[in-house]
Amino acid sequence: MRIIAKFEKREAVRFVSHLDVQRVFQRAFRRADIPLAYSQGFNPHPLLSYATALAVGYTSEAEWLDIKLERRMEADEFAYAVNRVLPQGFRILEAIEAPEGLPTLTGLMCAARYELSIDCDVDTNLLKAAVEKLLTGSICVEKRTKSGMKRVDIRPQVLAAEMMGESAALTVLGVLNAAEGLNIELLMRAIMAEHGGEFNYLAHRKHIYSQNGLIMPKLDYCDGVKA
C-alpha cells in the first residue's frame, strides 16, 4: 500500500539538510517498525519520495512524503507510531492512504506559499514600496547555473506578494513544480536591492498547493495571496 504524509520542520531543526531529513525519517521508520517496501536489485532501498526539498534554514508546516509499505497499515496508526520516535522539531501532521492511481507528489504540486519574518527595525513602508515596485516589471537577478552565473527574470515565478498589515512580514506565493520553483533567496536579494539595504529574515513554508486540490490544498488566488 501507499501512504501520503504531511510533516512539519520547526525551528529546532531548520538547519538540518534535506539529505539528513531523509536519514531522520528512515531511522524513525526503523524504530517504529514500519513495514517499508524496498526496491529490487543489488542495493535495495526504501520506496520513499518527497514532494520537494526545503532550503536549509527554512521552517515549514507543509512538507509531503510518499511511502510505500509491503503490507497494509492504517494511516492513523502509521502517524502515531512514527511521531513517537521522531526527534523534536519534526512531526507528522496528517497521513492518508493514497487513492488508486495517484500521481507522484512532484507531479501534483504547482505553487507554494511562504511567510517571511523580517527584522523589526526595517521601515515597513519602504519595504512595501519596494515589493510593489518590483511586481510592476521584470525581476532580473544573477543566478548560478551549470554553465556559470546567468542573469534571469524570476518575475514569472512570483504569483503574488504582499506585506502583512503593519508588521515586518511578507507573504509570497510562488511557482513550485517539477520543472521550476521560485527561489526565495533570489527574490529577497532583489527586494533588498530595491529597498536600499540588507536585512535578516526567516522563511517559513506555509502551504504547497496542487492545481486541482488533490491531496494538497487547491491553488486559488486572484490579485492577493491565498489565505
Image (cartoon, rainbow, N blue to C red):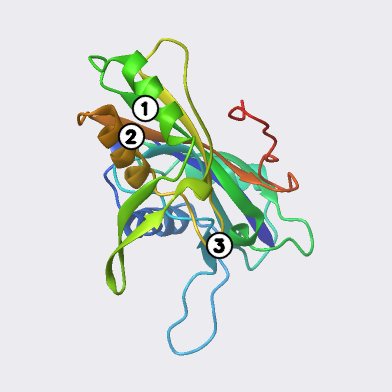
The numbered disc on residue 191 is 2
Q: CA distance from mark 3 to mark 1?
A: 30 Å
* Residue furthest top in the image: 166
Q: Nearer the viewer, residue 101 or 209?
A: 209
Say whether marks 3 and 2 touch (CB < 8 Å).
no
What number of labels is visible?
A: 3
Q: Assess disc 3: are there few (<14), some (14-19) or many (≥20) residues with their C-alpha within 10 Å of its C-alpha.
A: few
Q: Nearer the viewer, residue 200 or 48?
A: 200
* Residue 19 figure quarter: bottom left
Q: CA distance from mark 3 to mark 2?
A: 26 Å
Where 157 falls versus 89 (above or below)?
below
**Residue type beneath disc 2:** Ile
**Residue type beneath disc 3:** Ala
Element under disc 2 = helix
The numbered disc on residue 130 is 1
Q: Earlier in the sequence, mark 3 or mark 2?
A: 3
> Which residue does the image show at 26% across and 44% down from the upper left?
15
* Residue furthest right in the image: 100
State whether residue 11 appears in this view: no
Location of mark 3 (residue)? 178
Q: Earlier in the sequence, mark 3 or mark 1?
A: 1
Element under disc 3 = loop
Quadrant of the drawing holding the C terminus: top right
> Which residue does the image show at 33% across and 34% down from the upper left?
191
Q: Position of residue 216 (x, y in %)?
A: 66, 44
Q: CA distance from mark 2 to mark 1?
A: 6 Å
